[in-house]
Image (cartoon, helix red, strand yellow):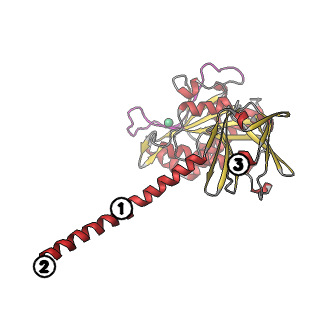
């Protein structure tokens, strides 16, 4: 072949390859960026709540929203992200220019910020609130009234449960299992038991329900901000050098400042007795816990339960089994019941 033709062909091939690469690698990214930019422009944030909520003293403590056209009350979703102190009201439809079309009115001083954004064919009003609240909603004709209320207005008792560690903080690790997973498994069993028992007077809040790692401050403030009646943190133990050993059994840590009748120490004792009874585990006893951040900073009766030892070959096998995890959860649930019977 002519050398010139060959050269031309090579250059053309090069250009084509380059264009192909741009198409495959850069275009989707550019499109994504453009979309993100559009979404950002469409998301609005208001720190001055009165910009979007017309103040109406006759709606004390309530917020009135006009229902967007074509949406029925069954379509409106309310999501309570209590760990983040955010409450979302979700409409299943993209609504442009929401606040100029649908005014809100009312009077509520629990809101720090309001955000409005659209995501996946949904329009979301997100309220950042100053504490842990439950949401009461009520529909009248084409209006929805929402109210953020103290959990104790709805429930007799509030229990905060904290599965220790999570995310990139695995806690103890032995035989291919991590403490964070066992802690969460036990708490998930507890959640199932509480749902099964269906006691609508007790509300359980969880500091995490998946493999995430809320900060210690976030964990303890869930208990403090919800004025919880009880705060339980679930952990598992390990020998101090992390090596397998004969150490075994259940141990519960308590808040040294809280040793009265309905204090942390007695609650820890209730937990120790019930968990050991349910598991048949060795009762190692109670331990002062003020070196632990979440115990030291808890304003409510707290117990940190070290269910068993991951560094004990017999106990780690038990801790891995669903049956033992369920028994641990039974013991914790019974502790809660006993504490409330005793007037906590
Ligand atoms: Zn731990």
Query: Marks 3 and 2, Cα distance to the nearest angstrom?
Result: 67 Å
Which element type, helix, strand or loop, lies under badge 1? helix
Q: Quadrant of residue 297?
A: top right
If the image is split into quadrants, where does the C terminus sit? top right
143 on left or right of 30: right
Measured Cα–Cα span from mark 2 to mark 1: 31 Å
Q: Which residues are magenta?
A: 235-261
**82 vs 191, nearest the viewer:** 82
Q: Nearer the viewer, mark 2 or mark 1?
A: 2
Report x, y in % for residue 157. 75, 35
The number of discs equals 3
On the image, numbered disc 2 is attached to which residue?
A: 2
Q: Quick check: 248 above or below 119? A: above
Residue 38 falls left or right of residue 312 = right
Q: Do we see residue 142 in this rendering?
A: yes
Residue under circle 1? 22
Residue 289 vs 199, above or below: the answer is above
Instruction: Tell me which label, 2 or 1, sits earlier in the chain.
Output: 2
């Amino acid at each position: 072949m002519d050398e010139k033709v060959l050269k031309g062909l090579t250059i053309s091939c090069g250009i084509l390859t380059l264009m192909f690469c741009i198409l495959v690698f850069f275009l989707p990214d550019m499109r994504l960026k453009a979309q993100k930019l559009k979404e950002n422009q469409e998301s609005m944030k208001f720190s001055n709540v009165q910009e979007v909520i017309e103040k109406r003293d006759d709606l004390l403590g309530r917020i009135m929203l006009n229902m967007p056209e074509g949406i029925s009350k069954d379509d409106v979703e309310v999501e309570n992200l209590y760990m983040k102190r955010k409450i979302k009201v979700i409409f299943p439809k993209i609504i442009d220019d929401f606040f100029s079309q649908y005014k809100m009115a009312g009077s509520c001083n629990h809101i720090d910020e309001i955000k409005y954004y659209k995501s996946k064919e949904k329009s979301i009003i997100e309220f950042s609130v100053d504490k842990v609240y439950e949401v009461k909603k009520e529909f009248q004709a084409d209006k929805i009234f929402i109210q953020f209320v103290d959990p104790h207005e709805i429930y007799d008792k509030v229990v905060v449960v904290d599965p220790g560690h999570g995310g990139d903080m695995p806690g103890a690790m032995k035989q291919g299992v991590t403490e964070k997973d066992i802690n969460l498994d036990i708490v998930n069993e507890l959640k199932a038991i509480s749902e099964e028992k269906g006691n609508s007077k007790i509300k359980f809040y969880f500091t995490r329900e998946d493999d995430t790692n809320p900060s210690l401050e976030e964990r303890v403030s869930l208990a403090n901000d919800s004025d919880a009646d009880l705060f339980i943190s679930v952990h598992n133990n390990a020998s101090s050098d992390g090596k397998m050993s004969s150490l075994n059994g259940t141990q519960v840590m308590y808040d040294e400042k809280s040793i009265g009748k309905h204090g942390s120490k007695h609650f820890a004792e209730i937990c120790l007795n019930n968990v050991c009874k349910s598991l048949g585990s060795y009762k190692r006893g109670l331990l002062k816990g003020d070196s632990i951040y979440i115990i030291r900073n808890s304003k409510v009766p707290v117990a940190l339960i070290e269910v068993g030892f991951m560094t004990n070959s017999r106990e780690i096998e038990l801790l891995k089994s669903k049956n033992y995890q369920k028994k641990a959860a039974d013991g914790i649930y019974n502790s809660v019941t006993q504490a409330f019977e005793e007037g906590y």
